[in-house]
Image (cartoon, grey):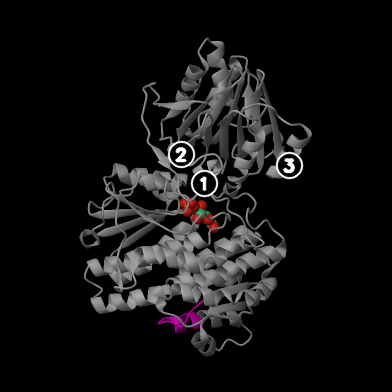
Amino acid sequence: MCGIVGIVGTRPVAPLIVDALKRLEYRGYDSAGVATLSEGNLDRRRAEGKLVNLENRLEFDPLAGNIGIGHTRWATHGAPVEVNAHPHFSTKVAVVHNGIVENFRELRTELQADGFTFSSQTDTEVIAHLVAKGMKDGLSPEKAAQSAISRLTGAFALAIMFGTDSNLIVAGRNGPPLAIGHGAGEMYLGSDAVALAPFTNRITYLEDGDWAVIRRDGMQIFDLDGNTVERAQQTSVGSALMVDKGNHRHFMIKEIYEQPEVIGHTLAHYVDFNEQKVALHEMSETEQPIDFASLDRLNITACGTAYLAGYTSKYWFERLARLPVDIDVASEFRYREVPMSKSGLSLFISQSGETADTLAGLKYCEAEGQHLAAIVNVRESTIARSSHSVFPTLAGPEIGVASTKAFTCQLSVLASLAVAAGVQRGHIDRERETKLVAELSEAPRYANEVLKLEEEIRQLAHSLANKQHILYLGRDTNYPLAMEGALKLKELSYIHAEAYAAGELKHGPIALIDEEMPVVVIAPHDRIFEKTVSNMQEVAARGGKIILITDPRGAEEAGMDGAELIVMPSMPEIITPIIYSLPIQMLAYHTAVHMGTDVDQPRNLAKSVTVE
Ligand code: F6R
């Protein structure tokens, strides 16, 4: 989703801004632009498509100036063409914006009546004209910006630069994140601390409703009434390294290969392998521990892949801890006016910690007086900072837009929490805890084993490339995993894929089965393996081509002549969702590579979805 960068500097900033924008590329975008102020002239370069197009433009037509703002745009209002790319200009004003100005139509009508002409289809352009109007009416740039921001409804993060002041950027936030970076004689602004890592690790995050005046020698933050507000300066951790692909062709496959290590790190944070018990990490002074024994309900809210991690854990919490779980996609939960239990826990799962719908779900639960817990990968994110208890995933920066290692780390945290809940609620005795912990500790080793299947999976993926539709089936925890498989495949390869609980097939979807329909079945040999075999037989009887992901015993007992097999090692049941994620990720990855799609930044997708 859109990325913002701003620099009030002491050297030419355009190349620095483009470099910082590159660090935001992972968010997903379809056009980019940069504007600078030099000798009283605001000027800009914009380009459709990737940042390389903007770089080429700047090479032929450079921008001078020691102050500037830049943007990567993920189109919401108006097509991803140059005229809609940011920065947007009005008289002596330049603006970049992330989010949606919901009242832009009425503001546009009002500004048109005042004589302003619009050159784009974006909602953002109203902000530039509103600020210019304020300045025309005699307000200072800061006051004009404050007045404009106070008229906007919706979610936004924005940066405004003025043709009249070469030492001023105004930033505003209501929703999407904004980080202010403190340098020596220079100040920076970015959508996250990663973008600013080459310049500084001293960061101040704006809160919702804040706006800031940023000058070379420092910054001041205000609320919308103009009162000064204090926000702590933090030292950002872990963002300084410029993440690269190493020897891998794509970030996605690199991140798939990182899984044995990051799953191990994450588990070690929640499990004491020496004592063979779950040991939820120490909380900071401001965090609140969770008493699972006193809970009567767990409510989980998330989006996309994070939602599917939550869905998997419903089976774990209900089975291991006898704790009823409601699981919802955040975009539905936030408007459903769900009655919340007074003794409930609300858990939010998010890699980025900035997903707008998940954050809105959190705000709803906050207003309902719930204990708020979060599983996040970005520890400094808004969702982490807004929660009473935070459970970090230790996946490291995830750059590929399609989530892989964050998902398996979320599963690792959730499995540990479910065991902890089972122990606290008296459903898991010491002996069973020891056994479950020993089983969890095996996850990194099995993940390593399974990576060795890559070549086999790569060849199998060729048979999926160019198919029109693919079905995924699974039962129990393999059902959400089937959904994750279908999601990965469609987002990366653009092949239509759907997942069903295997037993649900006969209630409609079986009508789709013919010789052209590959069906991926995820079925380790477990208690209900026989049931899934029956469903596979129903598919085979109708000519469907089966790809079965199972273990040696499953392969032997399935008796599916003609099925393609991915044979996984036999492993303990609790870790199957974590380990079986790897073949479905590799299957989607290699299908996409074979089809030549943009694996790390699939079309239309954004990594951090900060609009609803
Ligand atoms: C799919 C994917 C998305 C995200 C979703 C939530 O591969 O990555 O479905 O899982 O957009 O994002 P976070 O976890 O950042 O809240």
Q: Are marks 2 and 3 in contact (CB under 8 Å)?
A: no
The residue depicted at 46 percent of the width and 84 percent of the height is: 530
Circles 1, 3 touching at the beta carbon (< 8 Å):
no
- Is residue 515 in view from this perspective? no
Mark found first going from the N terminus, 2 or 1: 2
The mark that comes first in sequence, 1 or 3, is 3
Quadrant of the rendered structure where residue 428 is? bottom left
The amino acid pointed to by label 2 is Arg
Point 53% across, 65% down: residue: 258
Query: Camera-side residue: 608 or 490?
Result: 608
Could you tell me if the residues under marks 2 and 1 are in contact, i.e. CB atoms within 8 Å?
A: no
Task: Find disc 1 in the rendering and name its residue.
Answer: 609
User: Could you tell me the amino acid type at mark 3?
Assistant: Asn
Q: Which mark is residue 53?
A: 3
**Mark 1 to mark 3: distance in Å?**
24 Å
Q: Which mark is residue 202?
A: 2
